[in-house]
Amino acid sequence: MGVSNSDPTRLGCFVYPLSGSAGFLTFLMLFAAVGFSASTSFIIAILGSAVGIFIAWLFIRSDKVDFD
């Protein structure tokens, strides 16, 4: 049974920078390993950083936990 959470989750001040850097490094290493050029891998890694920050934002801003 899921429990409703009325308080926003406090995960600390490093959530966004760590999520951004993790997304950046993951996408950079993935697209560099596939064989893309350095500039293309870097641009895609910037987008990966934005995706990581967006996912962290979704988890932090969700005010309900529902496991039903």
Image (cartoon, rainbow, N blue to C red):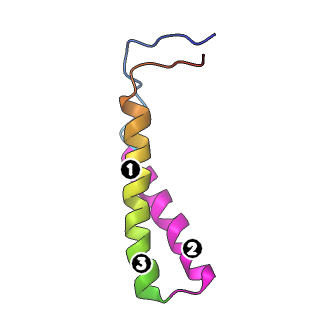
**Residue neighbourhood size for the residue with mark 2, other residues' Cα within 10 Å, grouped as few (<14), some (14–19), many (≥20):** some
64 vs 35, left or right, is left
Q: Are marks 3 and 2 in contact (CB under 8 Å)?
A: no
Is-magenta flag for residue 18?
Answer: yes
Q: How many marks can you see?
A: 3
Image location (x, y in percent) of residue 27: 51, 68
Dividing the picture into quarters, in which one does residue 6 lie? top left
Image location (x, y in percent) of residue 59: 44, 34
Asked if 45 appears above or below 35 in the picture, the reply is: above
Q: Amino acid at mark 2?
A: Met
Query: Where the N terminus falls, by quadrant?
Result: top right
At 35% from the left edge and 30% from the top edge, which residue is drawn?
61
What stretch of residues is rendered in magenta?
A: 16-36
Identify the residue position indicated by label 3 in the image. Answer: 42
Asked if 19 appears above or below 46 in the picture, the reply is: above
Residue 29: give its label: 2
Q: Nearer the viewer, residue 56 or 1?
A: 1
Image location (x, y in percent) of residue 23: 48, 59
Query: Mark 1 or mark 3, which has the lower sequence index?
Result: 3
- As helix, strand or loop, the secondary structure at mark 1 comes to helix
**Residue neighbourhood size for the residue with mark 1, other residues' Cα within 10 Å, grouped as few (<14), some (14–19), many (≥20):** many
At 55% from the left edge and 65% from the top edge, which residue is drawn?
26
Name the chief secondary structure element in magenta: helix
At 40% from the left edge and 32% from the top edge, which residue is drawn?
60
Residue 53: give its label: 1
Is-magenta flag for residue 34?
Answer: yes
